[in-house]
Amino acid sequence: MLSVFRRFIHSKFGALFAILFLGVIAAAFVMGDLNNGQFGNALGGGGTAAKAKGYTLSQAELQDRVQRVFENARRNNPGLQIADFFAQGGGTQVYDQLVSSLTLKALADDQGVHISKRLVDAQIAQIPAFQDAAGNFSQDAFRQLLVRERLTEQSLRDDISREILQRQLLGPIGLGVKLSDSMVTPYASLLLEGRQGTVAAVPAVAFLDNKEPTDAQLNDFYKKNAARYTIPEQRRIRYAVIDASRFAQAAQPSDAEISAYYSQNKAAYAAKQNRSIEQLVLPTQAAAKAIETQVKGGKTLAAAAQGAGLAVSTQADQSREALAASAGKALADAVYAAKQGDLTAPIRGPLGWLLVRVTAINETPARPITAVRGEIVETLRAQKEKQLLSSFTGKLEDQVADGGAFDEVVKDNGLKLETSPLLLATGKQVEDSAYTAPADIQPLLAPAFAMSADDDAQLVPITADKRYALIAPGDVVAAAPPPIAKVKNLVSAQYKLNQGNVKAKALAEQIQAKVAKGAKLADAIAQAGVKLPAPQTLGGRRADIMRGQQRPPAEVAILFSMAAGSVKTLPIGQDRGYFVVQLNKIDRGDAKGEPELLKQVSTQLSDVVGQEYGEQFERAAEKQLNVRRNAGAVATLRNALSANNSAGE
């Protein structure tokens, strides 16, 4: 049940509970490739991370997926290091998810469950990223996204198959979960709980030493805290832009093409008549005739309908075909036989008897080719331009796939090779904080920073169907701290602050010990021998503090994880000192009289318990299928990637 509660605090409503769990960091997670195959080595051998019946997860596959997830996380947090990623549980999360996929695939085979190609095709067609402006599946968009994300079609299909399989196997398990009031009420009551405490700050600046540190001290501090000064990876992007405007002349349609288009779409340019109507639906023919009589007597259809407690509906600019499709041929024929202002006789419809009045007749004269020539030219030009651009970019991709070097492909196709300055993944420069990457480079940053040095060039859309760039890896400056000479003043200031923080911690612990023995916090602060800020009283209700799903300050949050009357120390962070926090009072909440709150918490907890059932099912399947995990897989991977990262620096 603890795992249920743990996940509940991260749900939309349950974020209010997050105050109880400080420092929980969720690693970014994206899908990658997972290939199935036959075992070559026994579990525990050099290349196997997990094994489930006829399927295996190799150490190489695990490393590839973890690297993908890490790179994706680093796009949002360029300063993220591989050691931090593993420390936050990212590697373990990836491993568990891959083993879960392996288990469910083996279980599906064991139970004869199969995901058809047609089902996967339908799922792909529904993905918005693969659709054009009209909402239809676009093969071009599909191909471009796969190239941009460096995915094969088969790997994407495998991932979608596993997702569908997971829904089919695990979805029903969590349906219909209903928790008792005795289980929901304690969790809901926690939201109404209030706490009050006294917080005193022991700042590091109160202990700063005016004496300058020696070079040896600075060098040692800099070495131990290198990650603090590390500059994220920088790259130059080599690219060549392909713009649709290069095909402007070739895309101009001929007179023959214009005439052919006009002939093929003659119906669109023919004379048209649309009619606007108001209609009233009645349950019986007698009722319809009664309203008809009132209208013929001088009432409007709307007034007669209102008198019967009904209301008319209106439809504007309806063609005969549209009316026939929506209300039937009989109504369409009657409407188009009537004059403006006429009321039709009662007509039998699918939902009753209809009375329809024609409110307007809109005539659109035929448009000759001379009148629509410009419109046709623009339509054909855009179509041809798109086709020529697609063919050209397809040719570039084929040349790259056939082994063509980036420089050769650019030169052979008359493109202009450009190289960006050294950039961070954010598009900024280390040496020029005011620099912002141009509009053409912004869409290239993510794919360029995801490429390896030996990767082939790839095509990246700048503006879909209008502007593309062929990009290739350029110079890479690995993440590393700068020479200490460049940041010596900063290091010196932070060294002093760090030394002050050590003294602040010692004093905070002394004050904590005194208060724990019965002294008042204010008295202990006054007797500290150093001028410190006066203590403050803080607190509130858990629900109020977490309103808006934002975390409260750490010195307030810690109150909700303390025992009554206890006192704790808490680092302020960034070597700025320590808090001494004493919990004075707890006001217990009671949600019994809050039905709406109970309902919300019950819904959220039911969802989480359903997920828990799914996880327990997975664990049971692992046991049943004798899935074997390599206990050292994640540790081995962490060591390998950390070593590579250090070597790169």
Image: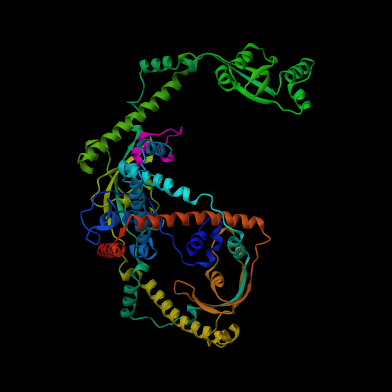
Specify whether residue 141 is painted magenta: yes
Residue 257 relative to residue 645: left or right: right
Residue 321 relative to residue 374: left or right: right
Name the image quarter holding residue 63: bottom left
Q: Residue 275 location in percent, x, y?
A: 62, 18
Residue at (56% x, 61% y) in the render: 16
Question: What colouring style does the render use?
Answer: rainbow
Specify whether residue 139 is painted magenta: yes
Work out whether residue 90 or residue 165 is closer to the camera in this orientation and state it.
Answer: 165
Q: Is residue 20 visible?
A: yes
Work out whether residue 151 or residue 237 is closer to the camera in this orientation and state it.
Answer: 151
Count of labels in the image:
0
Work out whether residue 464 or residue 540 is closer to the camera in this orientation and state it.
Answer: 540
Q: Looking at the picture, does residue 225 appear above or below residue 602?
A: below
Q: Is residue 420 visible?
A: no
Residue 428 relative to residue 592: left or right: left
Q: Give the range drawn in magenta.
A: 127-145
Name the image quarter holding residue 633: bottom left
